């Protein structure tokens, strides 16, 4: 679908805002996926251009933005809890509280915020994130609540300022929205229809990143291999063109949909040196019956054939996946099919989720919901299998040399540096901090269950 593309110019608003924001601080709470994180980077970019500076902690902030996610049920309670915590400190900082992101597109959440959370000042949705400066300025000028959510399929806004959390290893959204309507999923309702950015805009963004020293990028979209740049320019073309950009050594992408994994994309992955040979290939279920009910549009056999086909062309490939346990109607036999696929594919990592009912989705109205205790027993069994396979798989790295980008200090120990293998395994090692942001070869000396340790090869 071709969406309207608008280049946003906020210059006048940013200028005016500065007379209000002198010395004021912001805090953003990012509650969702990588796309949500990338949106938060744009929110931070806009707030900084308005004159706000980053607060050390939420208590010091004069504006707090909750960039919400509603992929699973428990997120809502989490948001209400966090909002409750701010009630008492709001007055102290004259704090403006904003709620945006995916929950902003849910009518029942917006209603609840309007009626029961009077200390929330601004509510916006995924389609008008770019309008945040206007909303904040309005709130600064007139002490009135601003609720503005757009119910549209979605457009594309270019030219927003961006404050990246990790500029050496950057997120680049290539498309927005989703047309797949998997029966369990809220995303098509919160993010609107699929729309692709112009490839020129994507390539320019990546060239700029490379000029600033970025080494690794992650291309983002709900279904990246249905990227459509127009005139036959598809995801495979994008991978090939990005591969030519000097300085970008590692290209990852998330997520491709198995039903759209064309030979052309497989060839591009095989040919492009920079493209990571680890593919996140969401399975969701290993049972053909459940996949049909989920509206995933592939069977167990088609998934396994695809894995084999990719392995034949890209021998060093490994896979990670997402699985939902306890979808309505899932029988013991269906669940065993999921275990079977997990054993056969030997995933590098499995991200597991217990099915969670989402309002307005097709699965919400299905009759045969699975009791909580059955869901959690199956989850535990899947986890045990996946963990044992991961523990086994990680052993293959010991004794090998892995090229990694040094990302920074380890979260738990500042004396240790950390990075990831091309296949996304964490590697910790002791070395000089001047190596941060550089690529180094690491001799892997041990595995620690879920991460690796090693030393720099001189
Ligand atoms: N576009 C991506 C998915 C994004 S959502 C894809 O198609 O793979 C990330 C993951 O959350 C999904 O892969 C799915 O495993 C999980 N998820 C989505 N909706 C869910 C629900 N209602 N209950 C439990 N897990 C869910
Ligand atoms: Fe949700 Fe399916 Fe779209 Fe992924 S492809 S975002 S799971 S509807
Ligand atoms: Fe959550 Fe929205 Fe991402 S629901 S997973 S933040 S697209």
Image (tube, rainbow, N blue to C red):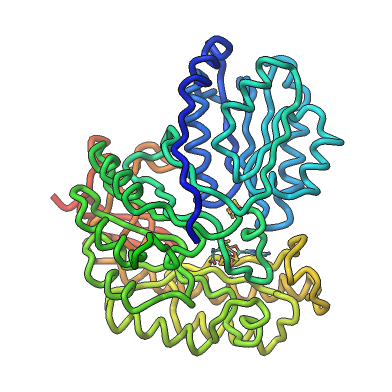
Residue 341 picture location, percent across and down: 51, 83
Q: Quadrant of ligand 2?
A: bottom right
Residue in the image at 74% along x and 48% along y: 76
Query: Image height check: is 376 above or below 425?
Result: below
**Residue located 39% across and 55% down the image:** 219
The picture quadrant where one finds residue 274 is bottom left
Residue 316 lies in quadrant: bottom left
| Residue at the extreme right of the image, as rendered | 115
Query: In the figure, is residue 395 to the left or right of 102?
Result: left
Q: How many marks?
A: 0
State the residue at coordinates (59%, 49%): 32
Question: Picture coordinates of residue 371 (x, y %)?
Answer: 81, 73
Residue in the picture at 68% in, 53% down: 70
Answer above or below: position of 209 versus 349: above
Where residue 302 appears, as percent x and y from the top left, is 48, 87
Front-most of 52 and 179?
179
Q: Is residue 77 left or right of residue 347?
A: right
Q: Give the percent coordinates (x, y) of residue 136.
A: 62, 24
In this view of the protein, which residue sits in the foreground, 341 or 413? 341
Q: Quadrant of residue 400?
A: bottom left
Does residue 136 appear left or right of residue 442 in this picture?
A: right
């Amino acid at each position: 679908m071709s969406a309207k593309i608008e280049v946003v110019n906020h210059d006048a608003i940013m200028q005016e805002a500065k007379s209000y924001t002198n010395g004021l601080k912001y805090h953003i709470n990012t509650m969702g996926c990588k796309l949500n994180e990338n949106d938060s980077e744009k929110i931070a970019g806009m707030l900084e251009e308005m004159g706000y500076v980053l607060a050390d902690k939420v208590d010091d902030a004069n504006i707090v933005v909750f960039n919400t996610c509603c992929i699973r049920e428990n997120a809502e309670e989490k948001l209400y809890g966090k909002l409750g915590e701010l009630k008492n400190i709001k007055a102290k900082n004259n704090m403006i509280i904003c709620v945006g992101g995916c929950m902003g597109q849910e009518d029942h959440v917006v209603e609840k915020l309007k009626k029961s959370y009077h200390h929330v000042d601004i509510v916006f949705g995924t389609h008008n994130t770019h309008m945040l400066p206007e909303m904040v300025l309005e709130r600064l000028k007139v002490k009135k609540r601003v609720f503005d959510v757009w119910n549209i399929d979605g457009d594309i806004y270019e030219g927003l300022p961006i404050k990246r959390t990790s500029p050496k290893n950057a997120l680049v959204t290539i498309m927005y929205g989703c047309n797949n309507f998997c029966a369990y999923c809220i995303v098509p309702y919160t993010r609107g229809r699929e729309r692709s950015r112009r490839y020129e805009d994507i390539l320019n963004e990546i060239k700029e990143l490379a000029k600033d020293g970025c080494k690794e990028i992650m291309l983002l979209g709900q279904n990246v291999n249905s990227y459509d740049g127009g005139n036959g320019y598809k995801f495979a073309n994008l991978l090939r063109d990005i591969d030519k950009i000097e300085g970008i050594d590692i290209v990852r992408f998330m997520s491709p949909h198995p039903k759209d994994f064309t030979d052309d994309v497989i060839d591009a992955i095989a040919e492009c040196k920079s493209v990571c040979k680890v593919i996140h290939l969401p399975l969701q279920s290993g049972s053909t019956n459940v996949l049909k009910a989920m509206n995933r549009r592939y069977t167990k056999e088609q998934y396994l054939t695809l894995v084999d086909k990719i392995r034949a062309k890209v021998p060093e490939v490994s896979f990670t996946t997402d699985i939902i346990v306890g979808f309505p109607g899932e029988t013991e036999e269906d669940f065993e099919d999921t275990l079977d696929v997990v054993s056969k594919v030997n995933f590098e990592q499995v991200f597991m989720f217990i099915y969670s009912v989402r309002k307005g989705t097709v699965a919400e109205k299905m009759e045969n919901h699975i009791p909580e205790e059955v869901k959690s027993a199956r989850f535990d069994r899947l986890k045990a299998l996946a963990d044992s396979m991961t523990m086994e798989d990680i052993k293959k790295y010991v004794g090998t040399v892995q090229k990694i980008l040094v990302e920074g200090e380890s979260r738990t120990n500042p004396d240790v540096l950390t990075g990831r293998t091309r296949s996304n395994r964490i590697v910790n090692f002791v070395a000089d901090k001047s190596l941060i942001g550089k690529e180094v070869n690491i001799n892997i000396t041990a595995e620690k269950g879920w991460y690796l340790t090693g030393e720099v090869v001189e």
